[in-house]
Image (tube, rainbow, N blue to C red):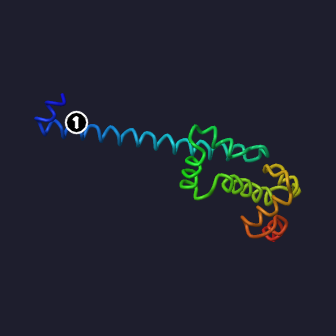
Amino acid sequence: ALRYALENEAYANACINALVRFALMKRTEYAKDVYSTIYRIISIIEDRYDDPHLKVSDLMRASGYAEDYIRSKFLKVTKMSPVKFLNHVRIKNAGDMLLSTELSINEIAQKCGFLDMAYFSKTFKSNLGMSPRKYKTESKS
């Protein structure tokens, strides 16, 4: 086959083109796997945001990819680090609960996966620009 390829330029070009197409196809399949993994992680975070023991580092390790690699792909897709994304989902849900329930701020924090009230308040303020109490009172008025 090698001798024929050396003597027949069209055959050699066809072999090279087939090899390149095969490599690109495999790379595309690999990329699809990475992105489906990212979307699976996003789905887990959205489903389990209320679990105070949910650790995105565990999700990254369980992905089957190197942590730094999957973290960088996650950042590319969401424009946020995995921890920031988890906090974003928790705070969004906390904001919704503040407006739609009569639960206390402490109860809402716990239902959204925060065990530390100070961290909840700090994270809420950094995400929404005001404290949970102010958000609740200003949104209702």
Q: How far from the left and from the top, in percent, is residue 126?
A: 74, 66
**Front one among 45 and 3:** 3
- The residue pinned by badge 1 equals 15
- For residue 76, above or below residue 20: below
Q: How far from the left and from the top, in percent, is residue 37?
A: 56, 41
- For residue 26, above or below residue 114: above
Q: How many marks?
A: 1
Side (left or right) of 74 relative to 140 = left
Q: How far from the left and from the top, in percent, is residue 62?
A: 63, 37
Circle 1 SS class: helix
- Choose top left, top right, bottom left or bottom right for residue 76: bottom right
Residue found at x 82% / y 62%? 121
Quadrant location of the C terminus?
A: bottom right
- Badge 1: residue crowd in 10 Å (few <14, some 14–19, many ≥20): few
Residue found at x 57% / y 51%? 74
Amino acid found under the numbered disc labelled 1:
Cys
Q: How far from the left and from the top, in percent, is residue 129?
A: 74, 70
- For residue 13, above or below residue 137: above
Residue found at x 68% / y 41%? 58
Side (left or right) of 1 relative to 93 = left
* Residue found farthest to the left: 7
**Front one among 29 and 10:** 10
Side (left or right) of 111 relative to 25 = right
Quadrant location of the N terminus?
A: top left
